[in-house]
Amino acid sequence: MACEPLILAAPGVRGLVPYEPGKPVSELERELGIRDAVKLASNENPYGPGERARAAAEQALAELGRYPDGGAFALKRALARIHGVGESQITLGNGSNDVLELAARTFLSPGDRAVCDEYAFAAFPISVRGIGAEVVRVASRDYAHDLPALAQAVVRTSARLVYLANPNNPTGTWFAEEALAGFLARCPASTIVVLDEAYREYVSEAGYPDGLAFAARHPNLVVARTFSKIHGLAALRVGYAVSAAPVAELMNRLRQPFNVNTIAQAAACAALEDREHTANMAALNRTERERLRAALTAAGLPVLPSVGNFLCVEVGDAARVYQGLLRKGVIVRPLKPYGLLRHLRVTVGRPQDNARFLAALAELRAP
């Protein structure tokens, strides 16, 4: 008699719920027969990459028949130069999710504990539980990281690892340099601190910390970043972590040798040099984010503070509103997996995308 697959699975996998990405436009159009749907669900850059990255990707197509450079020499060299770190401090990933999981696989064993915020990015607890380690969730303060409480939980539970996100996804909230300094001072040196900075290039607020500056002083800090957001390379899946060289060396022992493909490496190198595109994307996002926030607030809908490329808005019965928006061809992100039943996460899109979302939402709320 065949065994039930669930019995064969590792204990840490049995209770997992898979990460559910934002609904693709093609799926919505296929299900409901809708045309010209707008996707504001996955915090993508609606303008995509700059011309330099596009040209580099196209040129790299000539190498499709060969394996990528497993050490990603050119990309590591570019990252090291721009960030002022050693190449030995860099771990590359198939998107930043890859390095977030690598950290868990490297430093956690079954039965260990890892700490995160109650509204932490879903990839954090999945990475931890898949190993058979325990997730300790700490209550947020006004939907933001309570860093003193997180530090206390780390000490109280003897956690081996803690995840932070700045700004946080899905809430958009952030913490300042002084708060991060206080947290790292309280956190034991034996605990690995993983700081997810996927949206940092969008942030212009005074007092926002640069995680890499802290990494130079805290050898237990791993800073994760991505090319999927402001650089517009989400389809190519390339991210990286910067840490102390001994930490990176351990993580690289588990890294798959070809986890960043040739096209991704070439496009990422070009994107790093295209400062003008990055600055333009940040400015466009800031303008549209504040316009979208103002419109939602004027409509009587509470919006959480956000410094990323998305807003978390309270709409009441979020499941009903989400389904209603789908029928109008607008895809946003429901937050039920996070326990946020009254909120939706909305990516900041192009002006016409945001206008369509606002119009659809107004129609749904009309008496």
Image (spheres, helix red, strand yellow):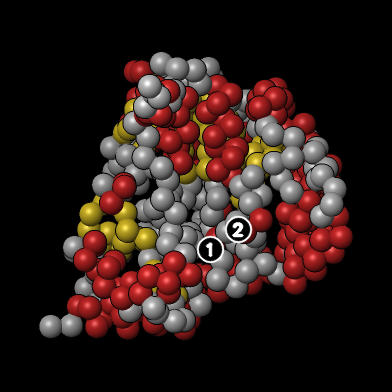
Q: Is residue 102 above or below residue 365?
A: above
Q: Which residue is mark 2?
A: 234
- Horizontal side, residue 271 vs residue 172: left or right: right
Q: Is residue 86 above or below residue 144?
A: above
Q: Which residue is mark 1?
A: 44
In the image, taking residue 218 as reference, residue 129 lies left or right, namely left
Name the residue rendered at 47%, 33% in the picture.
127
Count all numbered tags in the image, as a single digit.
Answer: 2
For numbered disc 2, what is the local secondary structure? helix
Closer-to-camera residue (356/197): 356
Quarter of the C terminus within the rendering: bottom left
> Which residue type does callout 1 highlight?
Glu
Q: Residue at x 62, y 34 (%)?
A: 215
The tag on residue 198 is: none
Residue shown at 70%/29% (left/top)? Answer: 252
Q: Position of residue 2 (x, y in %)?
A: 40, 24
Residue 267 against residue 35 in the figure, above or below = above
Label 2 and label 1: CA atoms lie apart by: 7 Å
Query: Which quarter of the figure has residue 362?
Result: bottom left
Q: Is residue 258 visible?
A: yes
Residue 217 is situated, as x and y percent measured from the top left of the image, at 63, 29
Tell me the crowding category of disc 2: few under 14, some 14 to 19, or many 20 or more residues within 10 angstroms, Cα based: many
Q: Nearer the viewer, residue 16 or 198?
A: 16
Give the amino acid type for the residue marked by disc 2 in the picture: Ala
